[in-house]
Image (cartoon, rainbow, N blue to C red):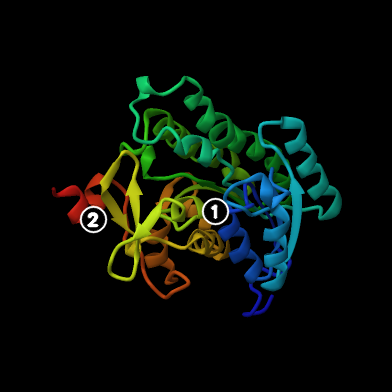
Amino acid sequence: MTDKAPLAGTVALVTGASRGIGKGVALELGALGASVYITGRTVDPSANVLGGTVGDTALEVNELGGQGIAVRCDHRDDDQVRAVFERIRDERGQLDILVNNACSAQDMAQHIGKLSWQQPLSAWDDVHQVGLRSAYVASVFAAPLMVEQRSGLIANISSMGAVSYLHSVAYGTAKAGLDKLAADLAYELKAFGVTAVSLWPGLVRTELILSQCRDDGRGGLEMVLPDEPDQAIPLEISESPRFSGRAVAALYQDEKRGEKSGQAFACSELALQYGYTDIDGKQPPVIRNQEDAAAALPSLFNQ
């Protein structure tokens, strides 16, 4: 293992990595030399208005020096998920990192700004089936591989919505569930040297977020809030998708990562601990609750 490729020989699986945070995590792990299995439903860029496919992500991982392996997988289908892990076992015989990122972000986005009783009941399923349940299923399939090798890292992509109101009741309860999933997995896996954590990205410049932005009149961008066009969030506090990947990589390379098992961390909080920055060299603000958000966005919260 060299300084240029500190994750050479490492095998990772990032779920829901056609675009967004999942893609950013896959790219960052690949840039450090990992072999990255990339799952998602999109294999045809015309099938999603935001573009991106599992194949595209795999190609970019290869260009960065890693090895990208694209696998079409609908994380609503347990048999498809099981097949992914069987393939990893057959082809690699190991799994070092699992990043549970798959979620129905676009389905959820249509409900933002609406109160729970104004949303269809399916809004619950949108964020719990692929988001919370899918993370549980992938973790259950990953555990035997990691237990056998007595090492591994499971990272759930959650958010501060786990502890503070964000977006909706359905969204918040799903994120709280991801944090509890990490805590209980940590308890069961402790004796086997496997670490489970929950990670909270901040405002991330995903394709979905950028599609909701406008020029802020100062040479930058701001995200327009649903149903409130007069309010917007400036993107200068935002994170690149690869920033979350740097959190995963830093945790995995920490020989004492087991001491963090079962806990939830803001990606920007880990950046201060481990000394990494975003790809532009910036340190995004640490936002763990509504008070932190208000401090980072006084013009939005203090009106």
The circle drawn on residue 136 is none
Quadrant of residue 238 within the rendered picture: bottom left
Q: Which residue is drawn at 57% across and 65% down?
A: 253
Report x, y in % for residue 53: 68, 53
Of residues 115 and 145, the one nearer the viewer is 115
Q: Which amino acid does label 2 sit on?
A: Leu
Residue lying at the far bottom of the rendered structure: 3
Of residues 256 and 284, the one nearer the viewer is 284
Q: Which amino acid does label 1 sit on?
A: Gly
Quadrant of the snapshot with the N terminus: bottom right
Residue 90 visible in the displayed image: yes
Q: How far is mark 2 from mark 1, CA to CA? A: 23 Å
Q: Which residue is the site of mark 2?
A: 297
Q: Which residue is drawn at 47% across and 63% down?
A: 240
Q: With respect to residue 278, does 140 lie above or below?
A: above
Residue lying at the far left of the rendered structure: 303
Q: With respect to residue 178, does 253 lie above or below?
A: below
Quadrant of residue 215 within the rendered picture: bottom left
Q: Residue at x 50, y 48 (%)?
A: 261
Of residues 114 and 302, the one nearer the viewer is 114
Q: With respect to residue 40, does 217 lie above or below?
A: below
Q: Dot 2: what SS?
A: loop
Q: Which residue is the site of mark 1?
A: 20
Report x, y in % for residue 18: 64, 52
